[in-house]
Image (cartoon, grey):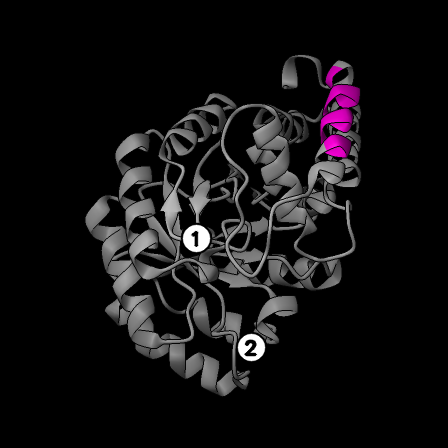
């Protein structure tokens, strides 16, 4: 990567036909749909992409296909989070060979590590990587918060170039924003899209927003409005983002509903299949009808942002 990454970097869902089979045609349509929205990058094999639930073979295939089709139009970031050190290295190697721009790492997620252990892990891992690294704070799933002293230590490593925070804690986010002023080349992204505009106002650089799989132009417009000083436009866009969240992420009672909602809405639009990696399953017909009805209800409000 030659420039600091900013803007909207969608965490792409992984279109599947079966447990270990990509929906190749759907993947191709999805990529073009997202890129047509004017996004600034693409993040694959993250939480929204069900990365840890996919076989290593399928992860390699996805990396190769995505990088080949994107063909340098935007930077491609590849998630390498794994419980096994050597597998993270192998995925990172595949990413580099395929032409990705950077890799993204959350703390290993089975046995929680203490901060000194996490620091040592990064000290050992980064020299093994051929690509620059973004750190990914996802304490709800990893059981570990990347604490400020660990971030301060990471700032000393030129191979680490950015941070994605999915904690939802804006006080923590603000503290990180202040800390990383020591490294003007670092990028700071927010995960929860419901807080995209507040994060920008705190000095963030953009969002890794799941809803940008569906309506990438909406999320791009919010960032553009904020940068242009159009407070009313940015606020109106953020209200629509909240409506996306309320409409599609809260159907059902499980945390997997967010990914199910995005995948189902994409399927309803004819973009890709909505098969989920085990142990999860796609929405049943009753939930699918709700998604379809809410897509139709939002269409007039979205206008040219669809």
Q: Residue at x 65, y 13 (%)?
A: 304
N-term-proximal mark, 2 vs 1: 1
The answer to whether any part of residue 72 appears in the image is no
The residues tagged by marks 2 and 1 sit, at their Cα atoms, a distance apart of: 40 Å
The answer to whether any part of residue 189 appears in the image is yes
Q: Residue at x 39, y 75 (%)?
A: 122
Q: Indicate the position of residue 188 as horizontal and vertical percent values.
A: 55, 51
Q: Residue at x 55, y 77 (%)?
A: 149
Vertical arrangement, residue 87 with respect to residue 204, above or below? below
Task: Identify residue for label 2.
Answer: 149
Which one is in front, 288 or 63?
Answer: 288
Q: Quadrant of residue 67?
A: top left
Task: Identify residue for label 1.
Answer: 19
Q: Indicate the position of residue 201 as horizontal and vertical percent values.
A: 71, 43
Q: Residue at x 39, y 79 (%)?
A: 121
Q: Indicate the position of residue 279 as horizontal and vertical percent values.
A: 56, 61
Q: Quadrant of residue 26?
A: top left
> In the rendered structure, which segment of residues is drawn in magenta?
289-299
């Amino acid at each position: 990567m030659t420039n600091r990454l900013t803007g909207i970097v969608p965490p792409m869902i992984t279109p599947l036909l079966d447990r270990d089979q990509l929906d190749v045609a759907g993947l191709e349509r999805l990529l073009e749909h997202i890129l047509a929205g004017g996004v600034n990058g693409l993040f694959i094999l993250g939480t929204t992409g069900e990365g840890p639930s996919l076989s290593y073979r399928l992860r390699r295939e996805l990396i190769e296909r995505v990088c080949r089709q994107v063909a340098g139009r935007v930077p491609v970031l590849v998630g390498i989070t794994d419980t096994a050190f050597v597998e993270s290295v192998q995925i990172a190697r595949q990413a580099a060979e395929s032409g990705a721009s950077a890799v993204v790492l959350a703390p290993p997620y089975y046995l929680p590590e203490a901060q000194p252990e996490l620091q040592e892990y990064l000290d050992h891992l980064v020299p093994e990587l051929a690509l620059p690294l973004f750190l990914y704070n996802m304490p709800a799933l990893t059981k570990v918060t990347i604490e400020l002293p660990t971030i301060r230590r990471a700032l000393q490593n030129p191979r680490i170039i950015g941070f994605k925070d999915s904690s939802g804690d804006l006080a923590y986010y603000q503290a990180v924003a202040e800390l990383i002023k020591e490294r003007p080349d670092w990028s700071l992204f927010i995960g929860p899209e419901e807080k995209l505009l507040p994060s920008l106002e705190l000095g963030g650089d953009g969002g890794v927003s799941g809803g940008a799989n569906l309506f990438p132009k909406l999320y791009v417009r919010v960032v553009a409005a904020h940068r242009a000083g159009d407070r009313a436009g940015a606020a109106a866009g953020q209200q629509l983002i909240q409506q996306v969240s309320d409409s599609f992420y809260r159907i059902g009672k499980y945390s997997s509903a967010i990914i199910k909602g995005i995948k189902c809405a994409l399927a309803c639009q004819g973009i890709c299949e909505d098969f989920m990696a085990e142990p999860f399953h796609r929405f049943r017909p009753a939930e699918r009808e709700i998604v379809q009805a809410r897509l139709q209800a939002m269409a007039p409000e979205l206008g040219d942002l669809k």
